[in-house]
Image (tube, rainbow, N blue to C red):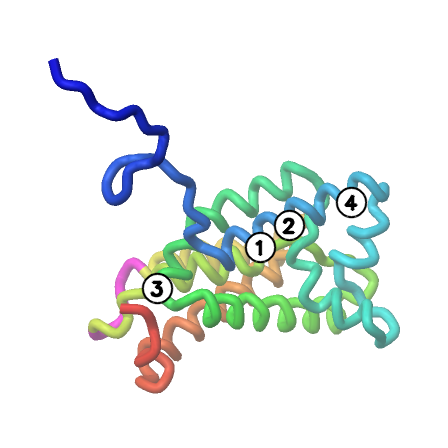
Amino acid sequence: MSNYPLTTEPKSGKGGFRIRYDSPVTLTFALLSLAALGLGYLTKGWTTENLFSVYRSSFGPLWILRLFGHTLGHADMTHFVSNMTLFLLLGPQLENRYGGKNLLEMMGIVSVISAVFQMIFFPKVMLLGASGIVFMMIILTSAVNLKEGGIPLSMILIVLIYLGSELWDAFTAHDNISHLTHIIGGICGAVFGFLYAKDPKLSEDLPR
């Protein structure tokens, strides 16, 4: 029988187990959204209404904050889970494909456009939640293969199914869901997909 020294140091290279913060933008956004939800419960909705929702109001620091912060807000845990499930599924793939900086820029653009449309057309209704960003991600994921030539049939079907149903619901459904935000997010996702596929200056710096 041979004797080996006892050590508790982890082995380098293969083996071992560790948790990686693999998608910083996606994970940080999800954690901030969870923190915003928790603050909403602790403040009985004050932070949700004043920091993490958007509506027409006088210009000021909070007005600017709400342009972006409304996508972090959620009405309750059910609302949060329904958005974050798809967000955490699609986000890492897109972050790996387009890079964290580019994905963050796209999310910011969707947030601002959604907020502006909400203040113009529904000034007395609060908008909150990441569903616009999620719809952007759905369409953008289907547009990944655009640069290989032609428009993927899968993208066409996704657009017809998701955006088509949202257009239908926008005129027929009577609920608290912002279908306009979903449509805006989907359109932005398609535009981003085409821009990155067709513009060499945009696509040359993407991760390979």
User: How crowded is the residue under tag 2: few (<14 C-alpha within 10 Å), some, or many (20+)?
Assistant: many
Q: Which residues are magenta?
A: 149-154
Magenta stretch, main secondary structure class: loop
Question: Residue flagged by tag 2: what amino acid is it?
Answer: Ser
Number of the label disc, if any, that sits on residue 29? 1
Question: Residue flagged by tag 4: what amino acid is it?
Answer: Gly
Whether residues under marks 4 and 3 lie with C-beta atoms below 8 angstroms apart, the answer is no
Residue 96: percent from the left, percent from the top?
A: 36, 60
Number of the label disc, if any, that sits on residue 113? none
Which residue is label 3 attached to? 97
Is residue 112 found left or right of 49 in the rendered image? left
* Residue 150 is a magenta residue: yes
User: How crowded is the residue under tag 3: few (<14 C-alpha within 10 Å), some, or many (20+)?
Assistant: some
Residue 101: percent from the left, percent from the top?
A: 48, 70
Measured along the vertical axis of the image, is residue 29 above or below residue 145?
above
Compute the Cα span from label 1 to label 4. Answer: 16 Å
Task: Please give the name of the residue rendered at 26% of the width and 68% of the height, measured from the top-left corner.
Answer: 208
Whether residues under marks 2 and 1 lie with C-beta atoms below 8 angstroms apart, the answer is yes
First in residue order: circle 1 vs circle 4: 1
User: How crowded is the residue under tag 4: few (<14 C-alpha within 10 Å), some, or many (20+)?
Assistant: many
User: How crowded is the residue under tag 1: few (<14 C-alpha within 10 Å), some, or many (20+)?
Assistant: some
Judge by depth and name the residue closer to the eye, 74 or 22: 22
Judge by depth and name the residue closer to the eye, 147 or 7: 7
Is residue 52 found left or right of 92 in the rendered image? right
Which residue is label 2 attached to? 33
Judge by depth and name the residue closer to the eye, 154 or 24: 24
Which residue is label 4 attached to? 40
**Quarter residue 14 falls in:** top left
First in residue order: circle 1 vs circle 3: 1
Whether residues under marks 2 and 3 lie with C-beta atoms below 8 angstroms apart, the answer is no
Task: Please give the name of the residue rendered at 35% of the width and 86% of the height, measured from the top-left corner.
Answer: 201
Question: Residue flagged by tag 3: what amino acid is it?
Answer: Arg
